[in-house]
């Protein structure tokens, strides 16, 4: 089973725990805007339905209706919809009060039509329930009850003030059947519209909840990284003093005759001094990455020079001679040598080297405006569960505290640079981790020719 993040470079933590990683979370919710579009669509359906109903009642049943005032109401709804379309084009977000106003205007329009066509005795009063249901789904509790109060008051008013329908003589005796027919048509319209629009509204709400869950997860990960960065920076400061003391002691001991006269001891002291210098270099890298020491950790270079230096340093530090490099990128663009990116690549190489010391391959490719860095090994591969949770912290098969942070940090570094990370197992043996980065985030000039 493949493990994540052996020997995690602590500098990678400080490198990505910088202020710019806290990109502001989106403050505008597109869900209300989508729901306002649905209300506009529903209003268009209402306009068409009213025109069809008026025409049917007038010419089929021969019932005289006040066509001029009813046409004025329909024209007002059309004008409201056109204005709503124009208004939406100028806004990115829609507040709860905007939805409440839209629903209240629809209730007023429905009440006006019912006033002209028999008041509360009109079987289409059941359409009030459509507005109330939509309000319960779309609005907060206070606004929903406000809409309920408006519909109740409207219904009560229609029992007092209304224009009676002028039924032809041959329909007077059959008024009850006509009322039942109207109730049936109103019920069907109410049920169909509720199912269609509430289903679409619920889909919008589910998309919003999923986006909020992703934002909460992202915020938790960023908070986790910041805390790790603070610990790494503090550890770097604390380690500086003992490392300096060890370096001084080793220099003093090297001058002792008994040690300098013994070639074996002298060689051991050389290795010890090199190890101390390596530790001091790591501590310096941590502070540089966190912006607490000289420089900002970035410098102009080219892609080929950046990768050549990285591979040479990595191979020398780990005495590794098994790294195969294939550069199929083609051009050699000028880029910024980013410390965080460098440590992310080193992290992936370390992970592969841990499980496949006999062979590791780094492939550099280009896909449009994307830089692809693929690290392959011949280890046991990733556990399927780990592949499904790529980039989650503490996803490791080593079963030891503090493990499983490697790909978590890599994913966050690459995400910070606008890229993505993917991984897969090979059919036979081994796995590949691919870092995909937009060249626009790294390039500082036009690519040169091949």
Image: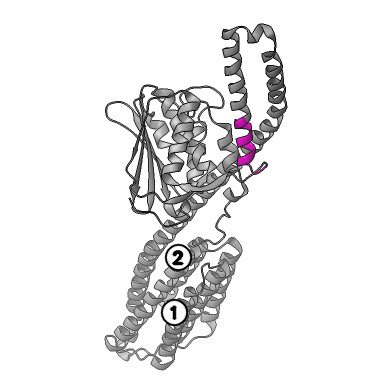
> Dot 1: what SS?
helix
Spatial CA distance of label 1 from label 2 is 15 Å
Q: In this view, does 226 lie above or below 98?
A: above
Question: Residue shown at 46%/42% (left/top)?
Answer: 306
Residue toward you, 252 or 357? 252
| Label ID, residue 34 | 2
> Which residue ends up furthest to the bottom in the rendered image?
68
Question: Residue shown at 39%/72% (left/top)?
Answer: 41
Q: Residue 359 at what x, y percent from top left?
A: 35, 25
Q: Residue 244 at what x, y percent from top left?
A: 70, 25
Quadrant that contains the N terminus: top left
Residue toward you, 265 or 117? 265
Q: Do the residues labelled 1 and 2 touch (CB within 8 Å)?
A: no
| Mark 2 neighbour class, 10 Å CA radius: few under 14, some 14 to 19, many 20 or more | some
> Dot 2: what SS?
helix
Q: Give the range drawn in magenta.
A: 281-292
Task: State left or right for residue 283 relative to residue 57.
Answer: right
Residue toward you, 400 or 238? 238
Q: Is residue 20 above or below residue 434?
A: below
| Label ID, residue 81 | 1
Q: Is residue 450 above or below residue 36?
A: above
| Mark 1 neighbour class, 10 Å CA radius: few under 14, some 14 to 19, many 20 or more | some
Q: Image quarter for residue 26? A: bottom right
Residue toward you, 30 or 6? 6
Q: In this orientation, does residue 226 appear?
A: no
286 magenta-colored: yes
Q: In this orientation, does residue 295 appear?
A: yes
């Amino acid at each position: 089973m493949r493990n994540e993040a052996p020997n995690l470079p602590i500098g990678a933590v400080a490198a990505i725990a910088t202020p710019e990683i806290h990109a502001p979370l989106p403050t505008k919710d597109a869900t209300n805007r989508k729901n306002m579009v649905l209300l506009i669509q529903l209003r268009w359906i209402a306009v068409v339905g009213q025109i069809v109903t008026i025409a049917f009642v007038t010419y089929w049943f021969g019932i005289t209706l006040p066509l001029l005032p009813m046409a004025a109401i329909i024209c007002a709804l059309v004008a409201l919809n056109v204005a709503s379309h124009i208004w939406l084009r100028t806004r990115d977000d829609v507040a709860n009060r905007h939805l409440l106003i839209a629903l209240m205007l629809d209730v007023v329009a429905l009440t006006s039509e019912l006033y002209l066509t028999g008041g509360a005795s009109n079987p289409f009063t059941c359409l009030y329930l459509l507005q109330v249901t939509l309000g319960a789904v779309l609005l907060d509790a206070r606004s929903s009850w406000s809409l309920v109060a408006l519909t109740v008051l409207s219904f009560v008013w229609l029992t007092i003030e209304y224009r009676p329908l002028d039924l032809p003589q041959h329909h007077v005796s059959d008024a009850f059947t006509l009322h039942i027919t109207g109730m049936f048509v109103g019920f069907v319209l109410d049920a169909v519209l509720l199912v269609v629009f509430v289903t679409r509204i619920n889909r919008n709400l589910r998309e919003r909840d999923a986006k909020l869950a992703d934002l909460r997860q992202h915020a938790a990960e960023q908070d986790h990284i910041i805390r790790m960065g603070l610990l790494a920076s503090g550890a770097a400061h604390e380690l500086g003093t003992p490392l300096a003391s060890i370096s001084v002691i080793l220099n003093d001991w090297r001058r002792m005759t008994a040690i300098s006269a013994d070639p074996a001891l002298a060689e051991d002291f050389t290795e010890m001094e090199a190890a101390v210098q390596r530790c001091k270099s790591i501590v310096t890298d941590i502070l540089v990455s966190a912006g607490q020491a000289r420089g900002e950790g970035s410098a102009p270079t080219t892609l080929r020079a950046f990768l050549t230096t990285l591979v040479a340093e990595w191979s020398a530090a780990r005495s590794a001679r098994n790294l195969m490099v294939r550069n199929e990128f083609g051009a050699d663009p000028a880029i910024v040598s980013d410390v965080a990116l460098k440590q992310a690549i080193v992290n992936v190489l370390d992970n592969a080297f841990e499980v496949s010391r006999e062979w590791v391959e780094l492939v550099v490719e280009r896909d449009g405006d994307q830089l692809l860095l693929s690290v392959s090994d011949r280890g046991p591969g990733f556990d399927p569960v780990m592949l499904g949770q790529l980039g989650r912290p503490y996803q490791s098969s080593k079963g030891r505290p503090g493990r499983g942070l490697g790909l978590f940090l890599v994913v966050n570094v690459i995400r910070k640079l606008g890229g993505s990370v993917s991984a897969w197992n090979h059919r036979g043996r081994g796995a590949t981790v691919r870092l995909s980065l937009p060249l626009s985030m790294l390039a500082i000039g036009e690519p040169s020719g091949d």
